[in-house]
Amino acid sequence: MAWWMWLVLGLLLLAGEILTPGGFYVFFFGLAALVVGGLAWLGAAGPGWVQWLLFSALSVVSLLVLRAPLLRRIAPRQREALAVDSLVGELAVALEDLPPGAHGKAELRGTAWSARNAGTRPLARGERARVEQVEGLMLALRAPQERSPS
């Protein structure tokens, strides 16, 4: 393939990455096409089959090696905001009566969650309870006055 075709392919792939919410997958294929285009322009890329092999290898290797560090550098605050462990210690409101050990619903940050009363005393509907633990999509709640077991 001609060097300019690789450059056009690379630019199209980079534009595709910008236009789609893909999470940095197509980006590395675009970069590999630009590198192969530059090598072809210099006459160092060899015949067509070598160019395609080089494009494939560069794409996959750069994707596997560079994607994770790039995502960590670009969006570290996004992952922190999604951490459910940050819910521990917050106050949730019981949406129904919860005897000790019972399962029900509680509201936290404007969203209804599955909840379990991890304390020794019942929680009444509308009562605030502290989030002690997050187990998947279930909140373990305890009345604020109650101490958790050590």
Image: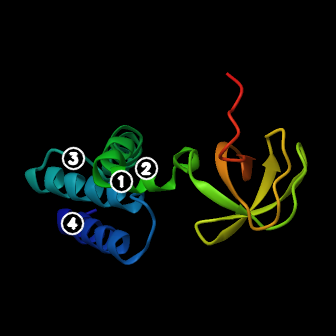
Depth order, front residue of 31/106: 106
Is 130 left or right of 141, judged from the image as shown? left
Q: Secondary structure at mark 4?
A: helix
Q: Tell me the kind of residue under disc 1.
A: Arg
Q: Quadrant of the N terminus?
A: bottom left
Q: CA distance from mark 4 to mark 3?
A: 13 Å
Sequence-first tag of 4 and 1: 4
Which residue is under mark 3?
45
Which residue is under mark 1?
77
Describe the colour scheme in one phrase.
Answer: rainbow
For label 1, the crowd category at 10 Å Cα-Cα, with few meaning under 14, some 14 to 19 and many 20 or more, is few
Q: CA distance from mark 2 to mark 4?
A: 37 Å
Q: Secondary structure at mark 1?
A: helix
Position of residue 136 measured from the top left corner of the image (x, y, whole percent): 71, 47
Residue at left offset 33%, top offset 60%: 27
- Label pair 2/4, CB-CB below 8 angstroms: no
Sequence-first tag of 2 and 3: 3
Q: Tell me the kind of residue under disc 3.
A: Ala
Q: CA distance from mark 2 to mark 3?
A: 43 Å
Sequence-first tag of 2 and 4: 4
Position of residue 140 measured from the top left corner of the image (x, y, whole percent): 74, 45
Q: CA distance from mark 2 to mark 1?
A: 5 Å
Sequence-first tag of 3 and 1: 3
Q: Tell me the kind of residue under disc 4.
A: Leu
Q: CA distance from mark 3 to mark 1?
A: 40 Å
Q: Tell me the kind of residue under disc 2.
A: Glu
Q: Secondary structure at mark 2?
A: helix
